[in-house]
Image: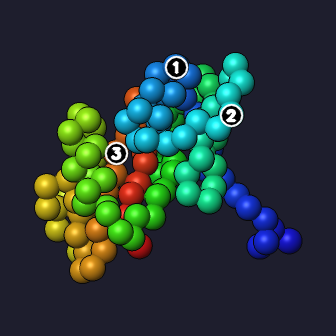
Amino acid sequence: MLKDMTSSAIVAVSDLPRARAFYADTLGLELIQETPEVLTFRTGATKLIVYRSDEAGSNRANAAVWSCPAGLMEIVADLEVKGVTFEHYPEMEGAKLDGNVHRMGHMRLVWLKDPDGNILHLNNL
């Protein structure tokens, strides 16, 4: 039924102007549509929908994931320069924390939060 349909990630935020600055300026996403309550960003071949909600930041799991098979380390370095704080999960079984990057064999995994505390995940897969 849905296997041939396009999906997109959706993230709740409390402050749209602050979210616009983070997703556009810090993460470098292209804003392609804006309404008073919703921002739509292009990210690869998909979209990231950012909407205002009183429930913003209440998700304790990944809200959005980016696959960065080439250039993950450069992206992390750029985000570090921009002052992004990364999440560290030293209890993750089989992972070795190397700076802000979790390494598991050939996998490189990175987590950060947006200003509302939504967990964003980057990986090299």
The residues tagged by marks 2 and 1 sit, at their Cα atoms, a distance apart of 14 Å
Looking at the figure, which quarter contains the C terminus?
bottom left
Q: In this view, does 95 lie above or below 57?
A: below
Name the residue located 26 percent from the left edge and 46 percent from the top edge: 78
Q: Is residue 44 above or below residue 81?
A: below
Residue type, label 1 = Pro
Q: Is residue 115 above or below residue 107?
A: above
Q: Where residue 109 appears, x then y in whole percent?
A: 31, 63
Residue type, label 3 = Leu
Secondary structure beneath dot 3 equals strand
**Along the line of sight, which residue is nearer the eye, 48 or 33?**
33
Q: Where residue 57 appears, x then y in whole percent?
A: 49, 33
Closer to viewer: mark 2 or mark 3:
2
Residue 118 in sight in this render: no
Question: Disc 3 marks which residue?
Answer: 112
Question: Disc 1 marks which residue?
Answer: 17
Secondary structure beneath dot 1 equals helix
Question: Disc 2 marks which residue?
Answer: 33
